[in-house]
Image: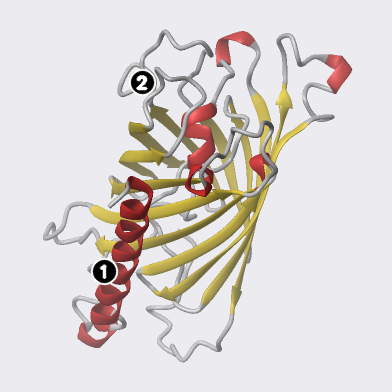
Amino acid sequence: MNKPKLFIYLFLLLVIIAMHASAQQVDSLLKTLDGSAKFNTVEATFKSPHVVLSHSSETQKKHDLDLRIRHHFGDIGGKFGGAHTLYGLDVATDLFIGLDYGVSDKLTIGLGRSKHDELYDLYVKQKIFQQKNDGGMPINLTFLAQVALIARKPFATTEFSNYSDRLSYFIQPIISRKFSSRISGQIIPGLLIRSATGDVNDPENLFTVGFAGRIKLTKRLSFVADYTLVNGLSRPNDLTVKYYNPLGVGLEIETGGHIFSLNFMNSEYILENNFISNTQKSWGKGGVRFGFTISRNFSLFKSKNKNQDTKSTIY
């Protein structure tokens, strides 16, 4: 079996496993709650399913649909920044619009489209374990599987010699913990699988290790950050093109049903299938850019939950 087909079958298998696990777990927590245990699980380790660049361990609530718009501008400084581009605001390096839907409280399916490479992505995100207050489970574990398709026309006749060259896959376990009511952190190893690269010395498969954190500043304002280690880990540092590890910091603001994030990052691109492999800007050389995320959550079905103690709250 050739490698692209193997990856497709692997992705489909992960989807089936996630949906089967979700079917076993739907509403099981609420059915077993009693007066002494209803607050046993640790909620809202992160406020959003995304941090700055990376996914968080959070999933959408059942039947909730999240409309997410993300925008990355150009370099603030350096050769391509400065006043003549209004410090990058004249330039859009990437723009993303996507939908995340909660099949259950622990299973999310997302679909989106990014401007760069006209990249379409489909992902499945399954929460496996949830942190407990009683110490029975000290961490959250969520599994992410994502496939992306480059839809643009080839720049050269040989660029996409096989259709599978347009596809890439990303697999990631997300391990997180809420250390206190204000501080959360996570470790996010991952594997990016590509069918083709622009440099023969650049591996098709990139192993990554990421770190992310959230510090709650006020009831509605949090500081968030994430960093992904790629270069020097599974990728040599002497490639023809110089690549950098993605680093993003931001402020996350909750305004009712909206979450609005103001971010700064060195990555030009938004999706893991792009920013992990293609970040060519440096924080130390003016390659930092401003970006923002607007998230609007919709409940597609009227909630039947009349228990005030288990309704969603602001953390």
Q: How many marks?
A: 2
Residue 212 placement: quadrant: top left
Which numbered disc, 1 or 2, marks the residue that appears first in the sequence?
1
Residue 127: percent from left, percent from top? 31, 63
One can see residue 170 in this view: yes
Relative height, residue 241 to residue 246 (above, below) = above
Front residue of 156 and 208: 156
One can see residue 53 in this view: no
Element under disc 2: loop
Residue 43 placement: quadrant: bottom left
Residue 252: percent from left, percent from top? 57, 45
Mark 2 surroundings: few (<14), some (14-19) or many (≥20) residues within 10 A: many
Residue 103: percent from left, percent from top? 43, 76
Instruction: Name the disc covering residue 17, or none.
Output: 1
Front residue of 113 and 2: 2
Q: Residue at x 41, y 21 (%)?
A: 202
The three-letter code of the residue at mark 2 reads: Arg
Quarter of the figure that contains the C terminus: bottom left
Relative height, residue 254 to residue 278 (above, below) = below
Q: Residue at x 60, y 35 (%)?
A: 269
| Residue positioned most to the left | 136
Element under disc 1: helix
The three-letter code of the residue at mark 1 reads: Ile
Q: Which residue is mark 2?
A: 235
Q: Residue at x 35, y 31 (%)?
A: 206
Residue 288 placement: quadrant: top right
Relative height, residue 189 to residue 68 (above, below) = above
